[in-house]
Amino acid sequence: MSTTDRRPRRRLTGPLISAPLALVTGAALMAAGAPAAHAKAAATIVVAKDGSGNYTTVQAAVDAVPANNPSAVTISVKPGTYRETVKIPGNKPHIRLVGTTSSKNDVTIVYNNASGTPKPGGGTYGTSGSATFAVEADDFQARNLQFVNDFNEANTSITDKQAVALRTAGDKIVLDNIGALGDQDTLLLDSASKDKVGRVYVNNAWIQGNVDFIFGRASAVITKSTIRLVKRYDGSSAGYVAAPSTAAGKHGFLIINSNVTGDVSDRSHYLGRPWHAGGDASLDPQTVVRNTSLSAAVRTTPWTDMSGFSWKDDRFAEYKNTGAGSGPASTDRPQLSDSQAADYEIADWLGDWTP
């Protein structure tokens, strides 16, 4: 195990999501004749399926945000199921996507593309392209809604069944009181490139899947969340929670103060395995699970190899987990010492950023 340099602890204070500003109608989204880089966005854009808002789809609201918007824009989404794919491009930062109720279940953004789904123009979507909701911009926040990929894994015409519900590739991403539901490759927490930092703070979330369903190269904190294991389409219980592809010298996944559970067979799921994307041996995947309740679904040897890369050559460890799926330290189950754990706190992952 490698450890990070110790830094002063910082408390996470203040609200996760900026308070919505005054409503501005859709007609004021762009000043007439103003260059796109300086166009003024509405402070709040309302999406409602029944037509009572500015737009009836989430993508239309995103499209209405001018490129290079300099300040926060809230997209307020009324309850309903929005069957669409949504992409926030890299030139539209500072978007706050907020469901109008306190329940993450009242607003659902859902689609069913898989990696092997044929694209209209030819070819297939690929794993990252299958995402129901994709965020490529920095400073994105989502609250009080859920992202779903309901691709049917039993579909025998498609062999590549990876199906992403939510993909992030920016920095300073906040996901608060959200759901991410799917089967294989549900939540892709990534960065713009291997040399870029992509920090993600996930709080009070419901994350559901079965195979590598939290994956990517982001420096991600998942706290106070439920990680729900589900069976495969054939009824079998087998899978992996995390598949980090962390670059060397960067933080990977920190799962802390959470709950790993599910209606699956005992000792059927690994906590994770190292994803050396593209066979890149220079990567140093990392996942630390600490102060978390583990159900009996977790294997007694919770880490395993992937594509010829040994997990023991990368960075996987636990600290003070509880529950039937927890276990004592061994060569197959590394545990952080108290002194090591002091460098594996939320503040170490977030650096100079306080969500």
Image: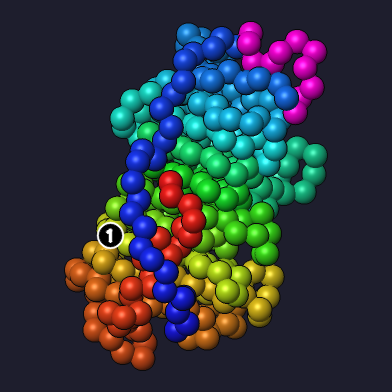
Q: Which residue is mark 1?
A: 257
Q: Residue at x 35, y 41 (%)?
A: 14
Instruction: Work out whether 32 lies above or below 222.
Output: above
Amino acid type assigned to the residue bearing label 1 in the image: Asn
Q: Is residue 34 magenta?
A: yes
Give how far across and how far down residue 250 sits, in percent: 56, 69
Image quadrant in which you'd find residue 131? top right
Secondary structure state at the residue bearing disc 1: loop
Within-10-Å neighbours for mark 1: few <14, some 14–19, many 20+? some
Percent coordinates x, y for residue 11 in the rendering: 33, 54
Seen from the viewer's position, the closer of residues 284 and 230 is 284
| Residue 352 visible somewhere in the drawing | yes
Query: Height in image: 35 above or below 51?
Result: below
Q: Residue at x 64, y 44 (%)?
A: 136
Q: Which residues make up the magenta segment?
A: 27-37
Q: Residue furthest bottom?
A: 331
User: Residue 73: horizontal and vertical position, in percent?
Assistant: 55, 27
- Indicate whether residue 252 is drawn in magenta: no
Query: In terms of secondary structure, what is the magenta stretch mainly?
Result: loop
Count of number-bearing discs: 1
- Left or right for 326, reference 281: left
